[in-house]
Structures are given as structure tokens and as C-alpha cells.
Image (spheres, rainbow, N blue to C red):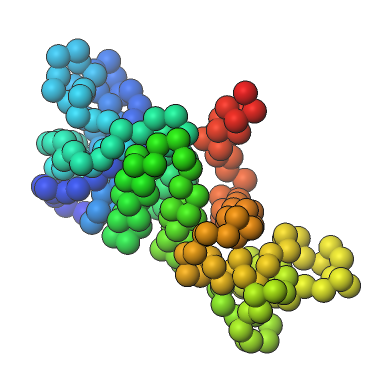
Amino acid sequence: MSGRQRIDGQEAYILHAYAYSETSLILDIFSRDHGRLPLLARGARRPRTALRGVLQAFHPLELGWFGAGEVRTLAKAEWLGGMPLLGGTALMLGYYLNELLLKLVPREDAHVSLFEAYAATLQALGETGSVVPAGHLRQFEKTLLRELGYGLALERETLTGEALLPDRKYHYLIERGPVMTSFSDGDQYRSPAILGKTLLDLARDDYTDPRTLAESKLLMRMLLNHYLAGQALQSRRVFMELQEL
């Protein structure tokens, strides 16, 4: 982006914040129309600044900023409200969403559908409390991959083009799609065998079947690990450690 620009009235969420100098913060935000970008929040760490109570993660904000460099300067921040507070498991899953966006979404790459999916998932997390809304997480992960250009093939066999059979098992080839498995495959495919019904359920976002929930989680974890290219998710590690405790 070239030239000095001023943006006003932009709905956004804070994904991450870290200290900059003695009194300021650098915010990594996810905005509706401008994607993910860093903002300098001058004076945000001062004890009496009004920004301290506004610049919170997992809540919709209306932001304004200006500047022409890689890091713009925050000019305005207002609390929009309407989002339930996250706590416990929901809070950890919120950090998981943020970490996926930080690690996978390029800066200044607008994704309105992904922004809306993120907001809807946070809303679901806040409303369900300690009950993990796994279906909402899978929907968000699907949207994320689609918006990044890695949309899933979930209804037809990759090699033959034939419709998937609900009672048959398939291996999902990354960046290709499902192929029917057989007893003679052995370790040919380094992916879990998944029931055709699971893939069809995933295509229509139907997560009422416990097996669909379990197998779709395995599939999405495999795909996300591939696109993360070795980047570890700290939120996932912490969440697993808390579950063990």
C-alpha cells in the first residue's frame, strides 16, 4: 500500500498485542475490509489511558488508523459490544482461532467471509460456555482453508470422479481429495482412513454423528498441520496440557 492513508470506521478484532517502548503497544488486528495488519497504539500502556479498557481480544472494535509504512498508527478505537465474554475452554479455543489467523493469513489480504466466520465462531464460543462447539470450529477451519485457496473436495472420489459412498472408507490426499481405500493399500497413503459419510457430513456441515465429529477433527488437524509447515500451535499444546490436568 503506497501513500499516506487514513481509514475510519473499520470493524476489527485484536489478534495479538505486545509492548512497544514504555507506553505503547503494537496490535496485530484482523479487520473486515483490510485483512490482518499491525497498528501502533501510542500511549496504550499508560495507567490512565482510555484505551486500556478498549483494546481487548475477542471483542468487536471500531478502529481508525493512518500512515503509509508497514506499521500504521492507531487513531481511534471504540468498543462495539454484543460479544459474550470468553472463559475456560472457550477462551483457549479463541486463542486457537487467533493463532491460526496469525500464522496462516498473509498481511493486508482481505477476507470478508473469513472475518464473518471468525465473528460467528467467537459468538458461538461465548454462548456455549464450557461445551465445545466442535461443529463451529470445523466450519471455521473449512472457511479458513477455502479463503486461502485450499478448499476441500468432499463429495467425489479424486481418481474416478464418482460420488463418495457413505459406507466406504477413503484416504484424503492433501491438495487433491479423497481416494477409496482397500485392504491392500497398506501404508501407501499417510493419512487416516475416513468414512465416506464423514466427508459428506463435513461438506454439508452436519456434525450430529459422533463419528463425524471425531474423524473430521483428525482430517482438519492433518490438513492444518500441513499448511502450517512445521509451525507449532502453542494454544493447542496448552489446551492439551490443561485437559491432562
Q: Is residue 232 above or below residue 186?
A: above
Percent coordinates x, y for residue 90 in the rendering: 43, 36
Determine whether, in the image, residue 142 is placed left or right of residue 20. Answer: right
Percent coordinates x, y for residue 207 in the rendering: 52, 59
Percent coordinates x, y for residue 103 in the rendering: 47, 46
Residue under the point 34% across and 30% down: 17
Task: Please indicate, yes or no, whether residue 158 appears anywhere in the rendered image.
Answer: no
Q: Nearer the viewer, residue 180 or 63?
A: 180
Determine whether, in the image, residue 187 is placed left or right of residue 62. Answer: right
Percent coordinates x, y for residue 147 in the rendering: 41, 63
Residue under the point 62% across and 70% down: 197
Residue under the point 86% across and 71% down: 183
Count of numbered marks: 0
Determine whether, in the image, residue 128 is placed left or right of residue 96. Answer: left
Residue under the point 19% across and 29% down: 54
Q: Quadrant of the N terminus?
A: bottom left
Q: Residue furthest top?
A: 47
Q: Is residue 12 above or below residue 176?
A: above
* Quarter-of-image position of residue 19: top left
